[in-house]
Image (cartoon, rainbow, N blue to C red):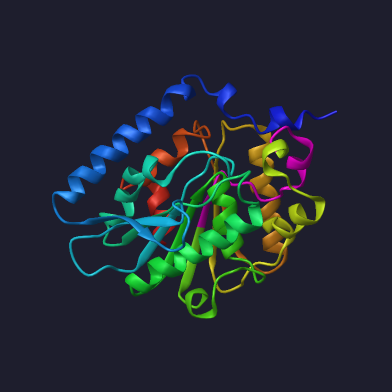
Amino acid sequence: MIDWTDAFDNSSYVPGSAELPALWARRASEYRAALAAKGLEEQGLPYGPHERQAFDLFHPGGTPEGLVVFVHGGYWQQMDRSDFSHLAEGARARGWAVALPGYRLAPDARIAEITADIAAGIAAAARRVAGPIRLAGHSAGGHLVSRMACVEGPLSQDVAARLVAILSISGIHDLRPLLMSKMNEVLHLTEAEARAESPALLTPRSDLALRFQVGAAERPELLRQTRAIAEAWSLKGGDVADAYLPGEDHFSIIEALADPASDLVAALLG
């Protein structure tokens, strides 16, 4: 029998992972301070009434090439946008405005409601920044940006028309195994919701660049999740490319988003 709780347990298999949240938060705080000194950041822009329904926006030096939105992970129940500000630098340094939305967390919100939060956050950021929109997300954030790329997605028609690409990093794309994990004590997923919110079971838009990357050193289930959506969406006519990055684990893989010269940023920006 598969232990589905263990299958999604990234932290126990990455030495030093317990220290990472504090490290990320420090780097993010230093990054925000540096951009604030240049007048290139805005914090806490609301898109809804809840305190977590807000986004931070980081500006390039000149007119933006367009908008990049990064959605953080934490299995829909942990972390905050403010922990990942520094990951905006790769795209920002290449001329893009970068928004980091927060969202309500489980158990206070169901995954379907979190999906709606992200759509609303993207729409609010899009009203402030003109041009094409590219989305990136990590772990649960990878799930959320993949949902935006579905024909059955929650984006409004005008925002969806501007979306050109998504990059899901170590994403969860089939939620059904979570029904059999301890995580569901917090998520409260039903079978119907797990199916409705699983991008791998839905139809992708055929007019987008659909990119999926995962660390080759990640848990086998994370590798399977990436293969599953890449295969399913390719068969449904999606413009799909998947990559399995040697030596990268579930946490190290996102560090490259801070580097404008990295392959990960190149995959995001096309």
Percent position of residue 188, x then y? 72, 44
Q: Which residues are magenta?
A: 167-183
Left or right of 46 in this view: 13: right
Q: Quadrant of the C terminus?
A: bottom left
Which quadrant would residue 82 be assigned to in this image? top left
Question: Farthest right residue?
Answer: 1
Left or right of 16 in this view: 61: left
Residue sitting at x 29%, y 49%: 89
Residue sitting at x 42%, y 28%: 20
Q: Is residue 267 magenta?
A: no
Q: Is residue 241 visible?
A: no
Percent position of residue 123, x then y? 45, 69
- Asked whether 54 or 205 is in front, the reply is 54
Percent position of residue 60, x then y? 23, 60
Q: Quadrant of the N terminus?
A: top right
Question: Farthest top residue?
Answer: 15
Left or right of 45 in this view: 115: right
Which quadrant would residue 112 be assigned to in this image? bottom right
Q: Is residue 179 magenta?
A: yes
- Asked whether 221 or 191 is in front, the reply is 191
Q: Give above or below for 209 relative to 207.
A: above
Please give the count of numbered marks on the rendered protein.
0
Q: Give above or below for 44 relative to 258.
A: below
Residue sitting at x 64%, y 40%: 223
Residue sitting at x 67%, y 62%: 234
Question: Farthest left residue?
Answer: 37
Left or right of 147 in this view: 193: right
Q: Is residue 253 visible?
A: yes
Percent position of residue 182, x then y? 72, 32
